[in-house]
Amino acid sequence: MLGRFHRLLAVGLICVLLGACSAARPPLELAPPGDIVQKAILLQLELAQQRLAEQLDTPQPRPKIGSISVKQLDPLYTDSLATYHLQGTYNLRLQLPHQEISQSNPFDIFLQRQIEGKSWRLLREENQGENQQSQWFSYLVP
């Protein structure tokens, strides 16, 4: 009788542990809404343009994005916070001094939901130099 109890206890414990392993992904229902994805793509563009504008000593153009299409959404946890890896395409419009440019571009972003669930952060891997390893940086999505 006692041996049967131990077997049932062991089976129950294994079921709980296996269930915990499979639940190691945040729910898709908590994935970022479209306006957050749009703001994050715009933030990523502005960060890249800022660096380029500083090097070229030119003013930054104001990009406008639209027609966002998410092709892949992968939920994961980063530092115990729900993080979503999104890949897809968007349309970019840039108004330059003498012309307007419009094109379709791919995006690949990581968005992390903050603990309170009210704000999101864009996670970016950036290279610091030729011989240095890349580092991850976090930017608040406005």
Image (tube, grey):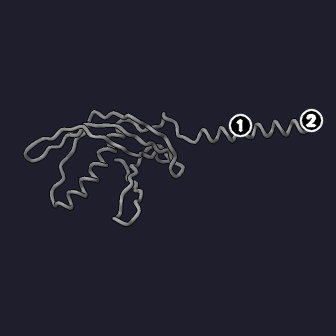
**Marking on residue 44:** none
Looking at the image, which residue sits at the far left?
98
Determine contact: label 2, label 1, CB under 8 Å. no
Q: CA distance from mark 2 to mark 1?
A: 21 Å
Does residue 57 appear to the left or right of 34 in the view shown? Answer: left
Disc with the residue nearer the chain's start (2 vs 1): 2
The residue where tag 1 is placed is 15
Q: Residue at x 41, y 46 (%)?
A: 110
Q: Quadrant of the N terminus?
A: top right
Position of residue 117 measured from the top left corner of the image (x, y, whole percent): 47, 43
Total marks placed: 2
Q: Residue at x 67, y 39 (%)?
A: 18
Does residue 22 appear to the left or right of 104 in the view shown? Answer: right
The local secondary structure at tag 1 comes to helix
Looking at the picture, which amino acid does disc 1 mark?
Cys
**Image quarter of residue 131:** bottom left
Looking at the picture, which amino acid does disc 2 mark?
Met
User: Does 93 appear above or below 80?
Assistant: above
User: Does 129 appear above or below 3?
Assistant: below
Q: Residue at x 31, y 48 (%)?
A: 43
Position of residue 134 measured from the top left corner of the image (x, y, whole percent): 40, 60
**Image quarter of residue 85:** top left
Q: Tell me the crowding category of disc 2: few under 14, some 14 to 19, or many 20 or more residues within 10 angstroms, Cα based.
A: few
The residue where tag 2 is placed is 1
The local secondary structure at tag 2 comes to loop
